[in-house]
Image (cartoon, rainbow, N blue to C red):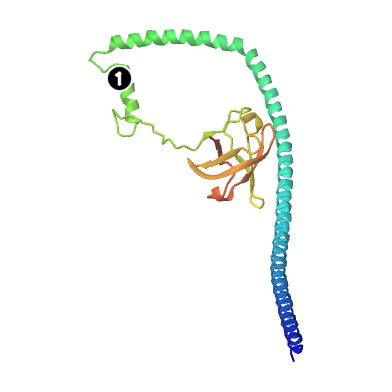
Amino acid sequence: MNKRGPVVLLVTLISALSLLLIFFLYNSKELERKARMQKETELSQKMSELSEKETELTDLKKQKEETEQRLNDTLSGLEATLKKADESAKILSEKIQALTDEKEALKKELEAKASQIDELSDKITALERDKSDLLSNLKGLQADKETPLYEKIQKKQEKKLPGGPGAKILYSLDTIKLGKIVVQKSSGRPSEVTYVDKIYGFIVVSAGTRDGLLKDSVVNIIRDNQLIGKAVVQKANENLAAAILLPEWTQQDIQPGDLITRY
């Protein structure tokens, strides 16, 4: 009876330890399973986010390709327009040369007639002397006190003014900060819009690098002393420039003849 007691106690202790070991093993596997499920959930979320990013990247690539295509189309149109403008400039240069030659011919003709003009000048001088003598005689024949001749002429001119005699003509200009008008050095004329492409949204202006219009230069488009648009120069040669209109600044339809200014 006494010998069986320690054996029973040992068996009970072994059983308890076995149960405790089984409990710890089960608990460890349960924790491992939960950790694995959490990792799988996080991985699934990451995969979903990655898929969304890939979709966004695909959309961005598509937008980039469309933008590049539009830009290439616009640049092609600009190049074609500049080519036409160069041809027009060449034709205009030939016309200017022809006019210059004609001017030289007229100059020679005027020089040939210089002697005739001198003779006419002498005759005019003689006529002026005769006129002076006649006026002196007329003044001597005036019996009453008339208003001097120059006063009569002055009053006659004053009657033509609005408001009658004594009226004055005043000029006033409103000062508007719209930038300085770009003056073309080759002609001395104000630069203006010469061509408008409404499809691609660009213009050609009659000024170029010689007038200070370089690539990326921002110009103002003016009509009736009002700002109606802005544009950025994309290409320019010596006398012409092509610029893309800025939609956010374009308030009216741009037309040939609108002036170009810069700050």
Q: Determine the residue positioned at 59% across, 39% down.
A: 218
- Residue 137 vertical position relative to residue 63 in the rendered view, above or below: above
**Most foreground residue, 37 or 229:** 37
Residue 62 appears in view: yes
Q: Is residue 96 above or below residue 197?
A: above
Asked whether, in this view, residue 153 is left or right of residue 260, the answer is left
Q: Quadrant of residue 97?
A: top right
Question: Can you tell which quarter of the image residue 176 is in?
Answer: top left
Q: Nearer the viewer, residue 248 or 22?
A: 22
Percent of width and height locating residue 109: 66, 17
Circle 1 is placed at which residue position? 151
Residue 177 image offset from top left, x and y in percent: 46, 37
Q: Is residue 186 above or below residue 12?
A: above
Residue 224 picture location, percent across and down: 48, 42
Q: Residues within 10 Å of mark 1 (few under 14, many from 20)?
A: few
Is 95 situated above or below 142? Answer: below
What amino acid is labelled 1 in the image? Answer: Glu
Q: Residue 62 in the image: x percent, y percent? A: 73, 59
- Indicate left or right for 222 with 205 as reference: left
Q: Quadrant of the N terminus?
A: bottom right
Q: Find residue 87 and report its image quarter.
A: top right
- Residue ID at (51%, 9%): 123
Front position in the image: 172 or 44: 44
